[in-house]
Image (cartoon, grey):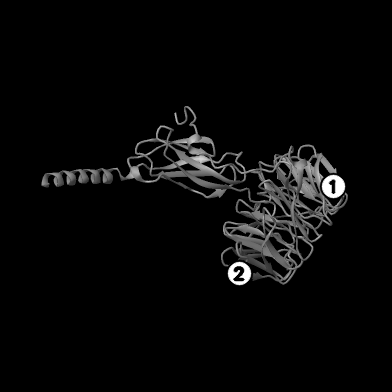
Amino acid sequence: MTTSLKSAGRIAGMFLSVVLLCGVCFAQPALTLSAAGGPPTTNLTVSGTGFPASTAVDIYFDTNNLALAVTDGTGSFSGIKIQVPASALPGTNWVTAAVPIVTGEAAQAPFKVRTNWAQFHFAASHTGLNPYENVLSRTTAPDLGLRWSYSTGGNVYSSPVVANGVVYVGSNDNNVYALNASTGAELWQFTTGGTVSSIPAVVNGVVYVGSDDNNVYALNATTGVELWEFITGGLIGSSPAVANGGVYVGSFDHNVYALDAFSGAMLWQFTTGSLVSSSPAVANGVVYVGSLDDNVYALSQSSGAKLWQFTTGGTVGSSPAVANGAVYIGAADNVYALNATTGFELWQFTTGDQVISAPAVANGVVYVGSIDDNIYALNASTGAKRWQFATGAAVGSSPAVANGVVYIGGSDGNVYGLNASTGAELWQFTTGNAVTSPAVANGVVYVGSADYNVYAFSDTTNPAQEPARPDPATLRPSLGLGK
């Protein structure tokens, strides 16, 4: 009996030792990603634990085998860099780490592909180009149909922005609205003391927006709860640009303001000679803005000191776009291209009336609307006209460019989709009144209209489907990867 007990104890001890020494073998494989979401081409770092020691592990994005890792003695790996494919569709995608099919250990982590249009004209530089759009194209744009519409309590003069599955927009019923980007269902609304024609900017979970009650507001993007407000001396139709912890906005009190994004404290102000309805653009440490005093200004982002000013032949209600070392902006007389560093005029182009539309810049072409009822495409280097498209009324809307298509609204009540290369009409939709500047994100076109509505359009004939979660057992590594 004693011998049997000793033998059993020895066996149990040996088993416990094996468990302690090889405990990692019983751990469940797990993955960690450096980011939970982002646009196509996002650079990701992948780390894993709980795999067999000293073993090759293939890394996949959906079914694309992108990298090969080798675990250390504890069954872990880290610092494996992959890039989200440019073709990755909006929605939940999956990163998989799998040991080849001999053993079958695998772990998965979700990655949310989003192509946010989170500020006026896409980003603080105001290029008006969404470079990540991969659902809508010249081929699919003709199939756009109404996805949903939402009625506010007033004319929608603000343009929508889209961030993390939510549409934010202002209305002249004094409210800022947050709507589900997929369904149009209202998530919250926030009431200011005046019309909201300012276009919101959404950065780091905060919505920044101006109002005709003279205030700039910062709101919690999830709940709509006010975080702070800053009062100026005039109406705010300008749309805030948010960059590097600062909020930059113009006011009818003739000033451009820089505010701390966290607290709302004023960092600096710069006084122009007239009303500032132009929305500042920020690029490379410089704030660019127009004023109704006929000037375009370049200001130091850090101090507000004037770097240069350029005098046009009329009021500047347009907002600048900054790309490839140039500033493109409209005025009451012309469209101008200026050297971004010196303010030196590169070229000017004359339309048939004033230009309050903010130019968009994509692939060497400048797109802009005019009060003369036309939309123009100009060579970005020379200003030479490439094409023009006639609408039924003035075009104050600013164009949005995505994947070879220009989207723009008109005072004729239509929103247009045009071939970016030729100007040929691909699609249009008629609302009940003047249309604001479009936003294009995740295969959907969003606009506001003075008919009280916000609209969303998508390809209704062939709706985009997010990828299915892959079965690790079906994944096959690419031969030669990592060699």
Mark 1 to mark 2: distance in Å?
Answer: 41 Å
Amino acid type at image mark 1: Asn
Number of numbered discs visible in the structure rendering: 2
Estimate how packed mark 2 is, as few (under 14), some (14 to 19) or many (20 or more) residues with alpha carbons within 10 Å.
Answer: some
Camera sees residue 380: no
Instruction: Give how far across and how far down residue 37 sits, in percent.
Output: 55, 49
Which of the pair 80/374 is nearer the observer?
80
Q: Residue furthest left?
A: 2
Say which residue appears at 26% left-offset and 43% top-offset.
Answer: 18
Instruction: Give how far across and how far down residue 473 sits, in percent.
Output: 48, 36
Location of residue 419 by image quarter: top right
Location of residue 266 by image quarter: bottom right
Left or right of 479 on screen, residue 290? right
Which mark, by number, is residue 167? none
Q: Which circle's residue, 1 or 2, is located before the other in the chain?
A: 2
Say which residue appears at 66% left-offset and 47% top-offset.
Answer: 442
Q: Label 1 belongs to which residue?
A: 374
Q: Label 2 belongs to which residue?
A: 228
Q: Residue furthest top?
A: 480
Which of the pair 64/425 is nearer the observer?
64
Estimate how packed mark 1 is, as few (under 14), some (14 to 19) or many (20 or more) residues with alpha carbons within 10 Å.
Answer: many
Say which residue appears at 57% left-offset and 39% top-offset.
Answer: 85
Instruction: Give how far across and how far down residue 117 sits, in percent.
Output: 66, 51
Quadrant of the drawing holding the C terminus: top left
